[in-house]
């Protein structure tokens, strides 16, 4: 019983945080404090997750596949940044 309450409370706090971040991002874009493409780059994991969920059909498999793809993109970004810095591209 207490586990269900704790999980519900944690999910509720996460939801409030996500809504707060979305509102803050929209407000910053409207006020001109943020670039629109920098805000929309945060949607990339959601899009990847949605594609994998549509293909694989389960939340757990889609979550793991999203994590793997995001880690590969991170590694690719590190390699590209390091190569560009080394060879002054």
Image: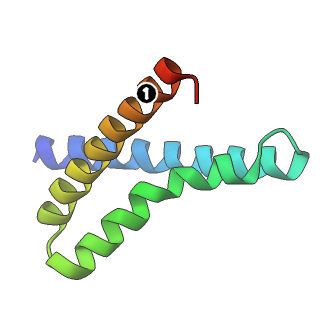
The residue sitting at the right extreme is: 31
Q: Is residue 29 left or right of residue 74?
A: right
Q: Which residue is mark 1?
A: 83
Total of numbered circles in the picture? Answer: 1
Find residue 20 and report its image quarter.
top right
Residue 2 appears at what percent x and percent y? 13, 41
Please name whichever residue, 16 or 48, is drawn nearer the observer in this view of the structure.
48
The residue shown at (20%, 65%) is: 62
Q: Is residue 9 left or right of residue 89?
A: left
Find residue 3 and report its image quarter.
top left
- Regarding mark 1 in the picture, which secondary structure is present there? helix
The coloring applied to the image is rainbow
Q: Is residue 37 left or right of residue 80?
A: right
The residue shown at (32%, 64%) is: 49
Residue 9 appears at what percent x and percent y? 32, 44
Find residue 59 and report its image quarter.
bottom left
The residue shown at (86%, 52%) is: 30
Q: Is residue 59 left or right of residue 48?
A: left
Crowd class of label 1 (few under 14; some 14 to 19; many from 20; radius 10 Å) = few
Residue 14 appears at what percent x and percent y? 41, 44
The residue sitting at the top extreme is: 86
The residue shown at (35%, 64%) is: 48
The residue sitting at the front extreme is: 87
Residue 29 appears at what percent x and percent y? 80, 50
Quadrant the C terminus occupies:
top right
């Amino acid at each position: 019983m207490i586990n269900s309450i704790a999980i519900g409370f944690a999910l509720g706090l996460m939801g409030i945080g996500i809504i707060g971040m979305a509102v803050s991002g929209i407000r910053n874009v409207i006020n001109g404090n943020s670039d629109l493409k920098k805000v929309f780059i945060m949607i990339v994991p959601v899009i990847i997750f949605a594609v994998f969920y549509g293909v694989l059909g389960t939340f757990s498999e889609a979550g793991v596949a999203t994590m793997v793809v995001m880690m590969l993109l991170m590694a690719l970004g590190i390699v590209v940044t390091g190569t560009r810095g080394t060879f002054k591209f």
